[in-house]
Image (tube, helix red, strand yellow):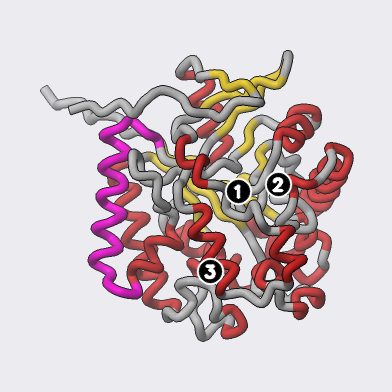
Amino acid sequence: MKRKSKKKPIASLSLDLDNQWSYLKVHGNPDWQTFPSYLDVVIPRALNFLGDRGLKITVFVTGQDAALRKNQEAIAAVAAAGHEIGNHLFHHEPDLHRYTEEEIDREVALAEDQIRQITGQQPLGFRAIGVNFSPAVLKVLVRRGYQYDASTCPTFLGPLARLYHFTTSDLTLEERNTQKSWFGDFKDGFQSLQPYRWSLGSDQLIEIPVTTLPIFKIPIHFSAVLFISAVSSALALFYFRCALWLCKLTKTQPSLVLHPVDFLGYEDVPELAFVAGMSLHRHHKLTVLGQAIQLLLKEFDICTVRQHAEIVSGACQLPIVELDLPPVINPVTVTF
């Protein structure tokens, strides 16, 4: 009798489609105001990469990019290829936590309108900028009918990442004050890696956290893997392989993130030399990225973040977290 193959767990994959101008903006470079774009290069390259592997993922789009004619053909191609489109705000502002509900609602609605016009999709998923959101954001998302949020990133390294960002940027003191919550706080490392529901009175909203290394809570997104590959590709892939092993050991269904710079080398956008990993050639990055994705495919079935939310919602009783409490849910479960 032929042995039945064991079904693989799921892993969701997303791309935060931050554009060249948004990197310049948070770096303090005034050239961002002309909205320079690399989407005409990144999107075809990413779609070919994903298409060659038969992958459908979630792409979080900034409304400002969808509003600019020069980007619309490329963004429309993402939806035409069958990928989910999520909301990544309109102005890509780093201080969302300081906004009122009314201001957040305008930001989310503006992005929705532009995304819907260009892609034909009504976003049902949201991701904030730089792990920077607030209870007011969740309330707005519920009111506007969103199915899930994917903004939390449980890591202890947020303050270190922010320090690195500040020391490598040209931000004014005022701009630094607006980004003082960028990348989150040390206490965020105690948040859960497992999906849960935010409780907002009589309403609830599913949270799909960006996965970090189980137990240790350090980044495992692909930009981090590529950064390590500058030292050694073998070391980077070993790190990623260990991360996937820990995810399986702790029964964590990972939700992993790509960034546009993962598909770009220094020769593509020399203006972004300050971004970690942008000293590498695109051929090197695409090779390592392809190998990492193959490791992921070997262990998990890849889906969109919306599918991830639907699967966990239907398959299990998700923990409920009160809005005014930190989402620390259950100790790590290790199986042997």
**Where residue 77 sits in the image (x, y, percent)?**
66, 59
245 in the magenta segment = yes
Q: Which residue corresponds to the image point at 81% horizontal and 77% vertical from the top-left?
A: 34
Residue 141's place in the image compared with 185, above or below, is above
Question: Seen in the image, is 231 located left or right of residue 202?
Answer: left
Q: Which residue corresponds to the image point at 65% horizontal and 25% vertical from the top-left?
A: 323
Tell me if residue 168 can be seen.
Answer: yes
Q: Which residue corresponds to the image point at 49% horizontal and 59% vertical from the top-left?
A: 160
What's the amino acid at mark 1?
A: Val
Mark 2 to mark 1 CA distance (whole Å) = 14 Å
Q: Which residue is mark 2?
A: 87
Question: Seen in the image, is 36 located left or right of residue 248?
Answer: right
Give SS at disc 3.
helix
Residue 131 is tagged as 1
Rate crowding at label 3 as few (under 14), some (14 to 19) or many (20 or more) other CA atoms within 10 Å.
many
What's the amino acid at mark 3?
A: Val
Rate crowding at label 1 as few (under 14), some (14 to 19) or many (20 or more) other CA atoms within 10 Å.
many
Cβ–Cβ under 8 Å for marks 1 and 3: no
Residue 287's place in the image compared with 89, above or below, is below
Mark 1 to mark 3 CA distance (whole Å) = 18 Å
Q: Which residues, given as a range, are shown in magenta?
A: 230-253
Q: Which residue is mark 3?
A: 261
Work out which quarter of the rendered image holds the N terminus and state it. top left
